[in-house]
Image (tube, helix red, strand yellow):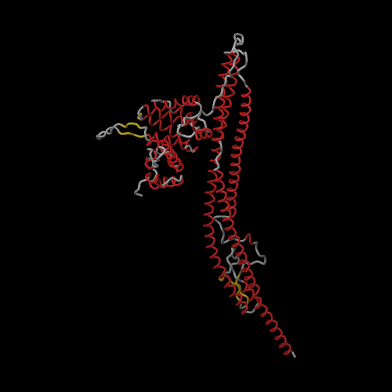
Amino acid sequence: MDNSVDDESINITAGMKDVEIANVDNVNSQAIDTLVFDLQKYSITTEYDIKTEEHFGDVFMPRTNYSSTTPDLESTVRDVSFDSISPSSDSEVLNSAGKLLKKVEKGLGNNALVTNVLVDFCKIGNTFVQGVDDLIKRINVSFENECEGAVTAVASLKSYMLKMVEGQRDFIDAVLNECAVSSHLKEQYEELKKDLIALNSDFEATEAKRNLCIGEMEDVYLQAKTGIQMCEEAKHQNPGVRSRLNGGLIAVLLNFLRLREDCNRFDKAQNSTKRLLHGQCEELVQKLQQLDQDRLSEMRDCLSKFAIYETARIRNLQYDLNGMIQTLDEFDPCQSSYNEKYINESVKFTTPRHPQPFINLSIPRVFSQYAVSRLSLAPPKERVITKLQTQLTKFVNCAWENSENIESVIEEFAGEMHSSLMRQIFCNLVVTRACEHQWSVEMECLKRMSGLLKIVLSQCDRQKDYWTGYEILKMAKLIHAKVPRIPGHDKGPQMCLLQTLIHSHRFWSSVAFWTECLAIVIGQDLQAIFENCNSETITFSPCTRELKSFYNWMTSFGIDKQRSRLLIVKTCEALKLPQSYWQDLVPRNF
């Protein structure tokens, strides 16, 4: 009886064990099949120390630091991470570039606002001019039976108003043509904006890959934890089950370690990519900073020119008003007498803004009228030119004479050179003085002159005044100083050109200058061809010495021969000049 019970209990126990083993086998086979690890971000915190063991009967179990509570994944030690470049540094760099981009955008808007204000200011000035013109038409100086003094006084008022209108028109033309903010900065801003958008997309793509890597590593980490926990919970199962679970766990952990190495390589590749993106972003930030500086410089130059033109207008207005006051001082009502004769003819005070230019009689009259009607820019008044020449003559004298106070006038001279008209007049004075001395000066004079011309070149570089640079280029080839003969040489005194003293200025390395300078020389050459041609034939080939020597000019200022040739060819092609015209401008041995 007892034996049968024992046998039955043994069979039941064995059956239960078979069921448990079967269930464990099913669970473990499914778990092992799902323990497939991909590249992730987190490593296992459980340590499997084969040297430290605990003995349970005949079974040896590994000691583990696994706890029943799974640690927070975000606080887990990251064995593989983007340590060199973190996401926070990415956002800081991009935010810095984005803020700077918005600052530049608002700044360009301010520049445009200044331009619009000046344009509206000029519109108000035009309205004022039209109103004064209407008043001038109402003034009739031929009063019947009026004394001569009164007629002269009213005529002085009309003359003053005419000069006021003329000065206002000159001022409006100068402001509209010289004080407008150029659009090239806006174009640079749009290009940099596109670059920043592209960089932001690259950063987002890199961050997306990084987040994918972290997500996959989290899955691997959880699967590894699950496998270790299953082995821990199966320590009371039969050895076959435990061996199978242990073998599967070993395979999973080995796979995890291999994936971890792949993650390390991925980490290095991503760090390299991010360093490259950071470098591009820093370069973009530098370009934005330079663009903002250029914008501020352009705004300052624009307002400085406006102040200069406004000052000149007010001064001219004061001179004209002084003339009217002088006329009124000479008018004495007590001594004036009425004219015995009626004044039959009106005293007309009409000052044409653009006198009829001399045009060859062979040109049809219709073209003559068309040319005059299209004339819109008038040169400055002669008295204005004379006054400016007087102001600048002292600087020429300081450079030409053995003056010791040249350093004291440098700052004043730099302030005068903000206007292109002042630079042009100064260069004309230098050329006139040098021509009087046969282009030869003392060496000390040449050094002082080069110092002043370097200041002029700096202003030309800032304001892109390539016309004045062209004038300096021509005089630098002519003005020279004789250097005493070196003992032991039979040759006479040597010449030191002005070019050698200003050769190192950065203005001469500007591609834009040489391109514009070539266009200036070509324009002068075509004008010479046009003026010398007859009605039958035109010799369409370079005729001026400047154009024929242009290639040598570029090479003498350190421009590479190949670059000089390419610049001449591209400029001529851009101007759509025939090859027969410009093919002799460069050597044929290329």
Q: Position of residue 503 (x, y in %)?
A: 39, 38
Q: Residue furthest right?
A: 1
Q: Which residue is outermost to the top?
A: 335
Q: From what the image shows, is residue 189 above or below residue 467?
A: below
Where is residue 223 drawn, in percent x and y? 62, 69
Residue at image point 43% right, 26% down: 405
Residue 442 seen by the camera = no
Apparent side of residue 196 relative to residue 483 in the rendered image (left or right): right
Please say if 560 is above or below 304. below
Q: Is residue 96 above or below residue 337?
A: below
Q: Is residue 366 left or right of residue 544?
A: right
Residue 57 vs 462, above or below: the answer is below
Is 409 or 248 nearer to us in this picture?
A: 409
Residue name at image x 53 percent, y 41 percent:
294
Instruction: Measuring from the top left, give residue 464's x and y in whole percent.
Output: 49, 38
For the question of whether residue 451 can be seen, the reply is yes
What is the quadrant of the N terminus in the image? bottom right
